[in-house]
Amino acid sequence: MANEPATLHPVARLPEEWNRIVAEAGERPFRAKEIFRWIHQKAITNPAEMSSLPTKLKTHESLQGAPIGEVERVHRSADDTRKLLIRMKDNAPVETVLLPRVSGPGSAADLESEDDDEDDELAREPANGPITRVTQCISTQVGCAMGCVFCASGVAGLTRNLGPEEIIGQILLAKREFEPNERLRGVVYMGMGEPLHNYPATKRSLELLTHPDGINLSKRRITVSTSGLIPEIQKLGEDFGGQIGLAISLHAVTDERRSALMPINKRYPLAELMKALARYPLPPRRRITIEYTLIAGENDTHEDARRLVKLLRGLKTKVNLIPMNGIEASSLGPPSFERVLQFQEIVAGAGMSCFVRRTRGDEVAAACGQLALLGATRKIRAHRKPL
Ligand code: SAH
Ligand code: SF4
C-alpha cells in the first residue's frame, strides 16, 4: 500500500485509503466503501454520477481524477472474441481482449489458473439462459522493454508503464462491452508489457481486482504471466501467498537459445528461474503454467521437447504450447501443425499435462499475448463514453 494515498488516482485507491480521506472530509466512515463500490462494482468514475453521495463528497477534490481513457475501437471476431483498443488520456494505445469461454483444451478456460467446473453462479441464474464466462486479457505497459524477438511488444520497445488505475481501468471500461449473459470469471495478465517489470502497479491492480468490496475476483482465477523476473516472482509469491496463478514464458530449454529469443535470460538464466519456480508458494493441487511458443527452426525439435520434460521434472507445472503468430517485424513463424502435435506428444507422453493453445480471434489479431498495435480491420463501434 502506498504511503501517500492522496497522490493516487481515485480509481487506484483501496477502501482503507478512502477511509482516511472520508474522515478528513468530515464524512461518515461508511462512505469509504460506498465510493469504492461506485468505482469498482458499478464502473462509475465520475463523482457527479455517484447519486447516493452527498454533494460535499461529490465535489470533494479527492474524487476528481482525470479520465483514464476511452474505448476507441472494438473488433469482434467470429468466435466472439473482442479486442478493445483503449486510448489513454495521453493518447497511448492499450489493448485488452475479452475471451468468452469455449470449453475444451486450448480454450480461454485453459488460460485461467484453476479449473472452475463447479460454478455456483451457473446454478443460481438459470432464468435468462446460460451464463457465458469471460476471461479478460489485460496489459500492464505500453510496449515492453524485454525485447523478445518474436513479440510485437518486444520489438516496439517500452513507451511507458501503465498506472494501477489504467490496468484496472481496462476492466472497468470493458464492462460496458459485456453481453447481458456474460460474466467476468478470469483475468490474465498476458497483454502488452511485462507485468513484473511494473510490479508496484501490477500489485495494486491485483489488490483492487480481488478486493471483496470491489470486483471481488478470486485470486485463483487470476494469472500473471512473466518472462521470468526472478526477484518479482518471489515478491508476487510472498505478497499474495502464492494464491495468484503464475505463468512463465519459457520458449526455450537451453540458455543459449533462450537468451537469443529472450534477452532477459542473460540476467536470469534457466537454472535460476527453475529454482525460483520451485520456491513459489503454490497452494495444494495448483500448478504453474509454462508457456512455450513454438517457433519453426528455433525451439521445435524433438530434442527440445525431451529437454523440456527434463527441465520441468519435479516441478508442478502444466505446459501450454502456442504456435507462434507471425508478426510484421520478424520472419519467424510457427512450425507445421504436425510438428506442433509431435512436440505435444513427446511432452504429454512423458506424463506431463500439455495442451496446444488454440489461437482466438485470428482475423482481428486478438491472439492473447500478441497484442500488437495493429491497424483496424473492422470498425464496428466507435467512441464510447470516456471513463
Ligand atoms: N510479458 C509477459 C506477458 C505478456 S505475453 C510474458 O512474456 O509472459 C503473453 C504470452 O504470449 C507470452 O508467453 C509471450 O511470450 C507470448 N507471445 C508473445 N508474442 C507472441 C507471438 N508472436 N506468438 C505467440 N506467442 C507470443
Ligand atoms: Fe515483453 Fe512478454 Fe513480449 Fe517478451 S513476450 S517482449 S516479456 S510482452
Image (tube, rainbow, N blue to C red):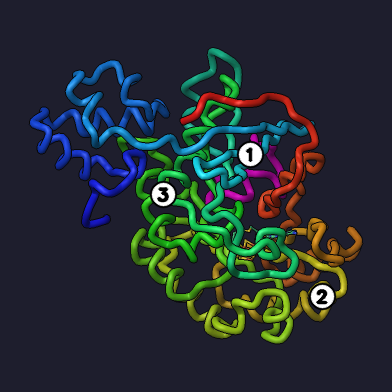
Q: Is residue 365 above or below residue 71?
A: below
Q: Earlier in the sequence, mark 2 or mark 1?
A: 1
- Crowding near the residue tagged with mark 2, few <14, some 14–19, many ≥20 C-alpha atoms within 10 Å: some
Q: Is residue 335 above or below residue 273?
A: above
Residue furthest to the front in view is 90
Instruction: Check contact, mark 3 vs mark 1: CB within 8 A.
Output: no
Q: Is residue 170 left or right of residue 150?
A: left
**Residue highlighted by disc 1:** 85
Q: Earlier in the sequence, mark 3 or mark 1?
A: 1
Which region of the structure is painted magenta?
99-116
Query: In what element is the residue under mark 2?
Result: loop
Q: Is residue 131 visible?
A: no
Q: Quick check: is the Cβ at mark 1 less than 8 Å away from ligand 1?
A: no
Q: Position of residue 125 (x, y in %)?
A: 50, 20
Q: Position of residue 228 (x, y in %)?
A: 55, 72
2 vs 1, front mark:
1
Q: Residue at x 54, y 78 (%)?
A: 273
Q: Earlier in the sequence, mark 3 or mark 2?
A: 3
Q: Magenta span has 46?
A: no
Q: Position of residue 377 (x, y in %)?
A: 80, 36
- Give amino acid for label 2: Glu
Q: Which mark is residue 22?
A: none
- Give amino acid for label 3: Pro
Q: Residue at x 25, y 28 (%)?
A: 34
Query: In what element is the residue under mark 1?
Result: strand
**Residue highlighted by disc 3:** 164
Q: Is residue 270 left or right of residue 149?
A: left
Q: In which quadrant will I find the N terminus? A: bottom left
Quadrant position of residue 174: top right
Q: Residue at x 42, y 29 (%)?
A: 43
Q: Magenta span has 105?
A: yes
**Residue highlighted by disc 2:** 298
